[in-house]
Amino acid sequence: MKKICLSVVGIFLTLFASFAQTTPKDTTEYKSRKLTFEEANLVSSYYRQDGNNAAVTGGIGSQKLSDISNTIDVKFTKWDKKDRKHSFDLEVGIDHYTSASSDQVNPQTISSASHADTRLFPSISWSVENEKKGSTFGAGISSSTEFDYQSFGVNLSFAQKTKNRSGEFSAKLQAYLDNMAYILPVELRPPGSVINEDGEGSRSDYPSKSRNSFSGSLSYSQVINQRLQIMFIADLIYQQGYLGLPFHRVYFNGATLPVVENMPDTRMKIPIGFRANYFMGDKFIIRGFYRYYSDDWGLSGHTIDLETPIKITPFLSITPFYRYYTQTAVDFFAPYDKHTAADQYYTSNYDLSKFNSNFYGAGFRITPPKGVFGVKRLNMLEMRYGHYTRTNGLSSDIISLNLKFK
Amino acid sequence: MKKTRHRQIATSIAVAVIVSATALGSCSTVKEYQKNKLNDGEMTLGSRKIQKTESSFQSYREGGSGANGGKTGGGCGCN
């Protein structure tokens, strides 16, 4: 883990340093045909949660989990002969979690391999913007790798500004092709399963299951006046394949041995969202978001998110925020010991149960003209803390840091 | 059950159309030099970079996700 972290930081510093001496950003009409460093962002987060409805143990048991996540993205731009702007975005993310419930996949081992995992998720994207026509075309690829899960993603996007440049329509297509190791709870594994000295097998010892996700996304943003802009977003997401997780136990009524959760092999999701940002006076910004969500598993939900950045000075702002979310349960959710053998589909995963949640906290952002801590290239520092509670007992905390280099 | 769901979606679309018609009807052309407030870093439409991990954990801990310009599935067998 330490090695991977150091390597990622090393790559980042090398890339950053190699472009640090390039031509300074031009303020004249000249547009660089050379690849120019635009900005880099480092986002680090620490997340922890606790609750008593772990899906791994059939809807009962500790949900204690902690996760450290680091993402670095670097953006470069260049102009071509036709005066089009090309943007290249390279991103590498790594996170490491420890989880009490994952440890229960195989509780016979002391600190088994399943109690922790590291995920590496790089991505590359490119876009070309034609300022004369007001159009942008983009494409990207991504991957995500952890011990029991591998994902590859591709995306294509197109955006077109309106004639007066105050509105923009955009469309995006995404596909994720995933593959997971079929790791059963230890008591359900066939006799003779291969295990190493740490109590688990290697990745190739487990059979594989696939999961594919395809989505289309449409959005339209519009400047209403000098202080207000809005956006509408609608997604259509289709998933197929193995949509549960093989180590999620379900205990039927009266049974002592569990079974593995069983979900339908397709899912259609329709989220529709609306955003509005309003600059009130000279110091207050109101950022609002509403989303309605519905899928064919019977789950529907509403999300309301409100943030109010307050500009204490032109270079310092604080941002209190509040988010409310409510959802109904999927048709086939039941708590521990409540499912019956007559059920076709079954899960005791409380993430799919009926609940409301509240997420609130605050952040601050500094953008001093001479750079953060006097470091000229360190353009912005932002920190944010949030506390999350769910009506079924789960609670979590998250703290994030964003450093922007320009 | 399905009829109720369809009615909810239809209601949401109707509300979105009414809100958008009202909002778009009151649009005024804003010139580039008048966009200093709209171009403020905190007026960005969409999630900001610092919200990346928050959006991820919300998509794992909640059944509903999407319509926020981010990932729409895949990538993690999360616990």
Image (cartoon, coloured by chain):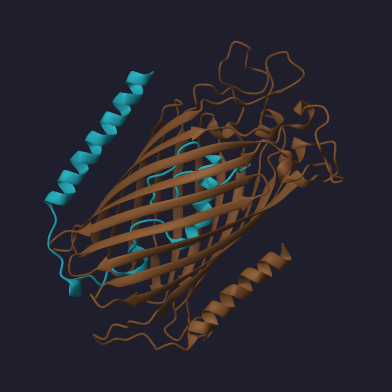
Chain colours: A brown, B cyan
Quadrant of residue A273 in the image? top left
Q: Which quarter of the figure has residue A333? A: top right
Would residue B15 appear left or right of A375 to someone viewing this image? left
Image: A338 above or below A401: above
Report x, y in % for residue A299. 45, 29
Residue A100: x and y in percent read 74, 43
Looking at the image, residue A20 lies above or below residue A204? below
Residue A111, position as x, y percentages in the image: 82, 46
Q: Which residue is drawn at the image coordinates 77% and 18% (left, top)?
A: A256
Q: Is residue A345 left or right of A293 when viewed as pictured?
A: right
Task: Name the residue rendered at 34%, 64% in the picture.
Answer: A127
Residue A160 pos. (x, y %): 22, 58
* Total number of numbered discs in the rendering: 0
Task: Determine if residue A40 is in view.
Answer: yes
Q: Is residue A256 above or below residue A39?
A: above
Please give left or right for residue A379 compared with residue B75 in the image: left
- The front one of A205 and A272 is A205
The residue that appears at 51% across and 47% down in the rendered structure is: A359
The reply to whether residue A45 is in sight is: no
Residue A9, image quadrant: bottom right
Residue placed furthest toward the top:
A342
Quadrant location, the C terminus of chain A? bottom left
Q: Is residue A119 above or below residue A282?
A: above
Q: Is residue A292 left or right of residue A255?
A: left
In front of the other: A252 or A345: A345
Image quadrant in which the N terminus of chain A is located: bottom right
